[in-house]
Image: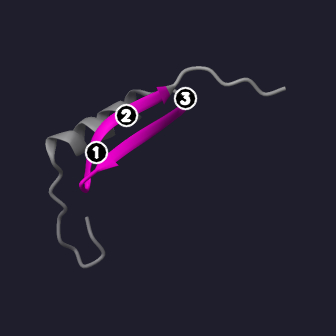
Amino acid sequence: MREDGSNIILTAKEKKIIELIRATGYGELKIIIQNNEPVRIEEITRSLKL
């Protein structure tokens, strides 16, 4: 919901992003956007800190 009280309508792709975020236990997701729309999500699978 926006600050003015109006609702935000999500596209199917935006809904899918939220589902993927909620299903991700931990880690990083990189969201690629083109022409104001999400087109791809990359999940970082391995990161090493020494």
Question: Tag 1, which secondary structure?
Answer: strand
- Residue 23, position in %: x, y? 39, 27
Residue positioned 22% across, 74% down in the render: 5
Residue holding disc 2: 41
**Most prominent secondary structure in the magenta stretch?**
strand
> Is residue 25 a member of the stretch shown in magenta?
no
Three-letter amino acid code at the position of disc 2: Ile
Residue at 33 percent across and 48 percent down: it is 33
* Helix, strand or loop at mark 2: strand
- Helix, strand or loop under label 3: loop
The magenta region covers 26-43
Q: Are marks 1 and 2 in contact (CB under 8 Å)?
A: yes
The image quadrant where one finds the C terminus is top right
Give the CA separation, mark 3 to mark 1: 21 Å
Question: Residue 30, position in %: x, y?
Answer: 46, 38
* Residue labelled with disc 1: 38
Q: Which residue is mark 3?
A: 26
